[in-house]
Amino acid sequence: MKRFETIKQAQLLTKKKIRKGTFKWMEAAAEDGYTDQVNLIELQKIKIKPKFLVKTGEINLEKKFFKNLFTSPIIISPMGHQTQFHRNGEAETAKGAKEAGALSFFSTQGRISLKDIRKNNPKLSFGWEIFPFGDLEWINQEIYNCEKYKCNSIVICVDANVRSHRYLDRESFYDARKYGKRTNPLSPNPTIAKFYNWKLIKYIISKTKLPVFIKGILTYEDSLNALKNGASGIWVSNHGGRMFNSGISSIEALKKISLIKKKYRTVIIVDGGVKKGSDIIKYLCAGADFVGIGRPVLYGLSLGGSQGVSRIINILKSELETSMINGGFKSNKSFLKDRIYE
């Protein structure tokens, strides 16, 4: 494995190692990438109020996700086409998640099938994301597979109905679908996603006892729709800025959406722009229960397979713990909104 000490270093090493088109595909975002940049800029604007002489002691980062306990609130977000970065793609990422004790999610848009991820990682607790790229019969089969292969939750992606125009990606004339093996069948009918509404969420929830999260939420109104239709949780995300150039950052959306906890007991996941441990503190203080990591995981996968993935998670865990001690955060219960300001 290529040695790296920071996320930034891992990014630079990945750029040197993998093919140019693959790197641009990974880094690309919708149109000119503005929303992706907003994720970074708005997160940096948030300031953390330190508290000193608070006797932090040893930090325990452990976090429970329903019945399963994980080593920290840092999770691996679902990402597609991972066999571009490693021969075994998602199965290898899952192995890295196991090594790091991290909650992880995989997707119908991935290359390695749910069956094969489970076969290669029999004891891993992970969730499965469904893109609504098929009819109800196909969606029912995906739900059945989630239960058969013992997923801990189902995530419904609602913010990616069609492939976006990503200038960085398209200008390189790169087609990710041509690279890397596939054991996960292609979704049967992506065009049908354009014709679903909130009744789909209610339908899916009626078909399973697994917790169901709605991913891609950016407004309080849509978070309310999700919970009113029976969702167990909300995943605040703009898809890493890759799908819709809204200009709404994940941190901006989270600050408003997290107010819903006054009305509903719910779990909130967020992702977007995390590069260091203090970024995670900002998201947790703004109301998130878990913080997802996307592109950095692919850096680790490219540089060292499962070891690289676990290395990325462990770097962020170490940075989070250090930041908590130096900033006066005793535990997960210390992440309060009055500890941040812009």
Image (cartoon, helix red, strand yellow):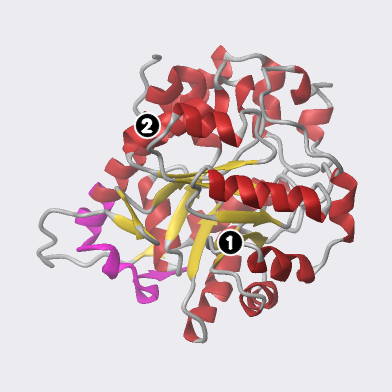
Q: Nearer the viewer, mark 1 or mark 2?
A: 1
**Measured along the vertical axis of the image, is residue 144 above or below residue 79?**
below
Q: Amino acid at mark 2?
A: Ser
Mark before the other along the chain sequence, 1 or 2: 1
Q: In the rendered image, which residue does mark 1 sit on?
A: 213
Q: Residue at x 84, y 26 (%)?
A: 171
The answer to whether the residue labelled 1 contacts the one labelled 2, judged by CB atoms less than 8 Å apart, is no
Q: Residue at x 53, y 71 (%)?
A: 255
Residue range in magenta is: 322-342
Observer-nearest residue: 205 or 156?
A: 205
Q: Which corner quadrant of the image does residue 237 belong to?
A: bottom right
**Measured along the vertical axis of the image, is residue 132 above or below residue 183?**
below
Horizontal side, residue 126 vs residue 184: left or right: left
Q: In the rendered image, which residue does mark 2 sit on?
A: 310
Observer-nearest residue: 61 or 40?
A: 61
Secondary structure under tag 1 reads: strand
Secondary structure under tag 2 reads: helix
Q: Residue at x 39, y 14 (%)?
A: 1
Q: Amino acid at mark 1?
A: Phe
Cα–Cα gap, marks 1 and 2: 25 Å
Q: Is residue 294 magenta?
A: no
Q: Report whether residue 37 is seen.
A: no
